[in-house]
Amino acid sequence: MLRWLLNLTALVSLIVCLAICGIWVRSFYYTDQKTWLTPDAFYEVMSGGGGVVIYRLRPADGEVRWVRPAITHNFLSAEVIEGRLARRRPWKLLLVPYWLPAGAAAVLPGVWILARAARERRAARVRHCPVCGELLTGEAASSCPACGWAKAPTEPTPARLTAPSPPAAAASAAAPAQPPATALNPKPVAYRRAI
């Protein structure tokens, strides 16, 4: 249930990211504008030039003073600018470049893609032989039918805990072990020792 919810959230986030990118591209060719008038302020939203601007102009507050427009807050190129219109009407402007919400909306789909790739990579390692790459299915999952590779036991056996006898150690040093067969080389090749 949790994975299904995360998949749905990643899908919605991807759709939002694509919609923002579409509006972002459109903003370079067209300027869109919408205004609202409420009893306490005038609002305007504009999209153009790669960003969105939200503008609020309040009615005259009775105070007459000059305020030069200034950036009051700045975070990752998103700016809040404040000033006064005709020295009487305070205004505030929020400027947000489209790459900021598009990047924020792309984080969850990116994490979903990376998690899925890691999950598939783990599953592929388990299903294929590490020597020859043969698919290990069913009863053959513990050993490879093509090259004979077998998974190491999870618990050490008593025979492995004992040290090899000296003649066996000398025999293993004298004759090198045969390399396993691979898909490209079905017959093992005997190597000569360099003298």
Image (spheres, rainbow, N blue to C red):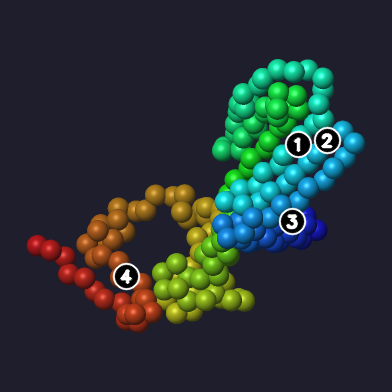
- Closer to the camera: disc 3 or disc 1? 1
At horizontal 70% and vertical 27% (from top left) the residue drawn is 86
Q: Nearer the viewer, mark 2 or mark 4?
A: 2
Q: Quadrant of residue 36?
A: top right
Q: Which residue is mark 1?
A: 56
- The residue mark sitting in front, 1 or 4, is 1
Q: Give the CA separation, mark 3 to mark 2.
A: 36 Å
**Residue carrying label 2:** 41
Mark 1 or mark 2: whose residue is earlier in sequence: 2
Q: Is residue 17 visible?
A: no
Q: Is residue 193 left or right of residue 102?
A: left
The x, y position of residue 57, in whole percent, is 76, 34
Image x and y of residue 25, in percent: 58, 60
- Category of crowding for the residue at label 1, using alpha-carbon neighbours closer than 10 angstroms: few (below 14), some (14–19), many (at least 20): some
In this view, the mark in front (3 or 4): 3
- Disc 1 versus disc 4: distance between alpha carbons? 77 Å
